[in-house]
Image (cartoon, rainbow, N blue to C red):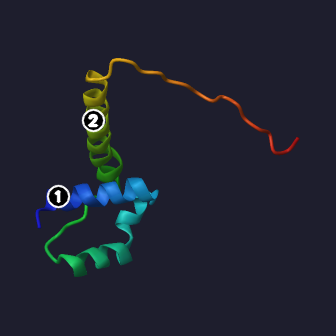
């Protein structure tokens, strides 16, 4: 399997599951990746948290732009109400 595709899938898993980026450098995680694909070299956490994250953000932004391009009527709302649990 192509390393770029694996990088993309792993970065998406980290982002969507809320896995801290430093886990990518954990020896047990690296070992698991090596068992799944001995030729794959995992990215460093800095690459994961910067370049690969930026790539995913760009994809989301492009998808939003595509949707907005064909949208005639759009309403954006924000519920700014908060409840203070201590009171």
**Image: 16 above or below 84:** below
Looking at the picture, how far across and down is residue 1, in whole percent? 11, 67
Could you tell me how far apart the alpha carbons at marks 1 and 2 are, in whole angstroms? 19 Å
- Up/down of 44 relative to 33, above or below: above
x%, y% of residue 25? 36, 66
**Marks 1,2: beta carbons within 8 A:** no
- Say which residue appears at 30% left-offset and 79% top-offset: 31
The residue indicated by pointer 2 is 63
Q: Which mark is residue 5?
A: 1
- Residue 32 lies, in percent from the top left, at 30, 78
Local crowd at mark 1 within 10 Å, few (<14), some, or many (≥20)?
few
**Closer to us: 2 or 21:** 2
Callout 2 secondary element = helix
Q: Position of residue 86 (x, y in %)?
A: 85, 44
Q: Nearer the viewer, residue 35 or 45?
A: 35
20 or 83: nearer the eye? 83
> Residue drawn 58% across and 27% down?
78
Residue depth check, mark 1 versus mark 2: number of the one nearer the observer: 2
Identity of the residue furthest to the right in this view:
87
């Amino acid at each position: 399997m192509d390393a770029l595709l694996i990088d993309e899938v792993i970065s998406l898993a980290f982002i969507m599951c809320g896995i801290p980026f430093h886990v990518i450098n954990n020896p047990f995680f690296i070992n698991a990746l090596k068992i799944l694909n001995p030729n794959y070299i995992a990215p460093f956490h800095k690459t994961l948290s910067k370049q690969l994250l930026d790539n995913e953000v760009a994809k989301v932004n492009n998808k939003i732009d595509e949707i907005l391009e064909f949208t005639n009527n759009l309403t954006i709302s924000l519920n700014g109400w908060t409840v203070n649990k201590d009171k």
